[in-house]
Amino acid sequence: MNISSLSQELNISLTDLRRKLREAGFKISPRARKIDNHLARQIIEKLKPKPKIDPAKPVAVKEVTIPSVIAVRDLASVLGQSVSAVIKTLIQNGVMASMNEQIDFDAAAIVASEFGYEAKEEKGSVAGSGTVDEIIAHESAESLAIRPPIVAVMGHVDHGKTKLLDTIRSANVMATEAGAITQHIGAYKVFYKDKYITFLDTPGHEAFAAMRARGANVTDLIVLVVAADDGVKQQTLEVVNRAKLTRTPMIVALNKIDRAEANPDRVKSQLSEVGVVSEEWGGKTIFVPISAKQNIGVDKLLDMILLTAEVENYRANPTGTTVATVIESNLSKTQGPIASVIVQNGTLHVGDIVAVGSAYGKIRSMEDENGKVIRQASPSTPVRIAGLSGLPEVGDLLRVYTDIRDAQAESKKLLMRRQAKRLAYKTGISADAENQQLNLIIKADVQGSLEAILQELHKLENQDVKIRIVSQGVGEINESDVLAAESARGTIIGFHNSVSSAAARLAKQKKVNVDIYEIIYELTEDITQAILSLILPEVEEITVGEAKLLAVFRSERDYSIVGGTVLSGQLQEERKALLMREQKKIGEGKILELQRNKQVAKAVPAGSDFGLKISTKVKLQKGDMIRIVDEHLKEKKLKKIQ
């Protein structure tokens, strides 16, 4: 922007403008005639006279309602601005989008604020909006009925989680289900003392992070398994933190008490240091000593689960709004996209029309964890469903609709929202080629998501490129993150969060890359590609022909003329040749001319004699070998740290 234009904008003379700039702390050369637009906006905000506000008169705030996803040209229409003005504002805020491209609500709200509007998201514009708790809260109290608790068994590796689940399952499944083929659907129900308990058996860090990020905290109760002979480990602490963050009740199962080295009091002491104090020690957490291997204390653990469920009073409306959460999804060769879901309210039926994240369809079939075909599923029941248009993501909410077109529209809306968010903030992961490392600033929506991302990045550690986490945290990406990224020559990675408008402007000014992700595997794919881009390619030489020299006719400084016979493959004109003597490489060359039966040839096959002129400085001898090779770049792969 021209300084003269700026003085006109502020309605002050050039002399006064330069004086006020110095007084305000803006370091601009007295001879400068132009400044960048970002600085000009800062100056205008600082020096433009603020309108006097009469306290007796309320200030009118312009509000505008914007859907979760909107095309740039439609946003311009809503705001009463030109498309070029909206695009310019988007660019200034670090979002690159053309007039026909979709942007999400967060990006649209930033633009609206630049034009003096307060943006509100259109109600019902987000597919599958509303958490399960919010949905159940709208049910009448009289319609709510007790439902089985949903329990996640978690803990450090090798502390006995799987063995405990196997023991519970084998001892407590209903007799009518004995001998049934167990399907891996991510959860199962057990029948104990005339009551059901639903256990999650695949809740890894990623699954929990995804569920939590979408407001889908499926777990009612966590059973933390700690080996009494090993004590508290890193994953033990992660489970404790997750329980605190999600405010999920927790029972501690002290496993392997049958071992001579078992020391339950040591475990209780270690856990008390992180705020998990047993009832025996005056705390509120139930500790149950067990041996999953010997089936000791497992019944007591189940009793405590039922007691906790009774105290917590888990309820749902079996006849209310049907909602379920995806815990697994996979592609079946015979049935197509399959989703494992846990019903959390209402009753799911075969034939229901559903939208599940970005997928939709009519439920064609439904099975329980034993592969038994069922027609309906009530709250806390895990089922596998078929009939969807695509694979939903872990944590996606399933909602029931009366019309397939409505379900399709809602799933399409969510897909567009995810794509728009990814498009808006996708700038590419920058790499520090000089030091062979990626410098990353990680910001996630919640701690659980952050843990899952860090766990995935740990899997990508390799011998060639270092992954350096400059800083990590939870919340919106701010200006401090941008400055940290600039200093470290790094990239900001966001997960299920947004960038403040000030940070977006600063990132553009400082040329800092900011990437926002909705799906963990897309994040890991991009980081993997960034790592591979730093790895130097390896050239692989493939032998396509080999020949033996029988005579050297002429040997000059830069070339030789020789004759011989082709032993395998073929000799080809204009090809690279390795020169071998006694199985050792003595040099390289290039075939300039090739003859067969004293006739010029482009190739000579195996079993044929030849004469050739080869470009080389090596003095060839009778008996030397010529090996023709093709050069190929090896596929880049991560070399794991040994």
Image: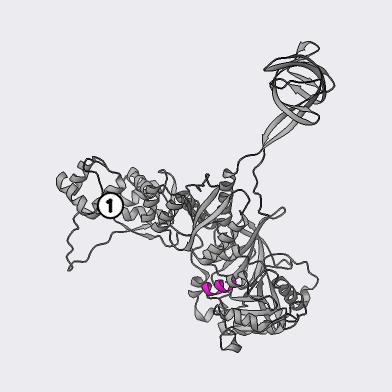
Residue 499 vs residue 338, the one in the foreground:
499
Residue under the image location 22 percent in, 40 percent down? 31
Q: Is residue 554 magenta?
A: no
Residue under the image location 52 percent in, 72 percent down? 245
Measuring from the top left, give residue 244's x and y in whole percent.
Answer: 53, 75
Magenta stretch in the rendered image = 239-248
Measuring from the top left, give residue 419's x and y in whole percent.
Answer: 50, 51
Measuring from the top left, give residue 338's x and y in whole percent.
Answer: 66, 58
Q: Residue furthest right?
A: 607
Left or right relative to 59: residue 405: right
Instruction: Please name the residue that numbered disc 1 is placed on.
Output: 42
Task: Please say whether residue 173 is visible from this viewpoint.
Answer: no
Mark 1 surroundings: few (<14), some (14-19) or many (≥20) residues within 10 A? few
Left or right relative to 222: residue 504: left
Task: Please say whether residue 529 is visible from this viewpoint.
Answer: yes
Picture quadrant where residue 37 is located:
top left
Residue under the image location 58 percent in, 70 percent down? 238
Look at the image and name its color scheme: one colour
Residue 406 vs residue 596, the one in the foreground:
596
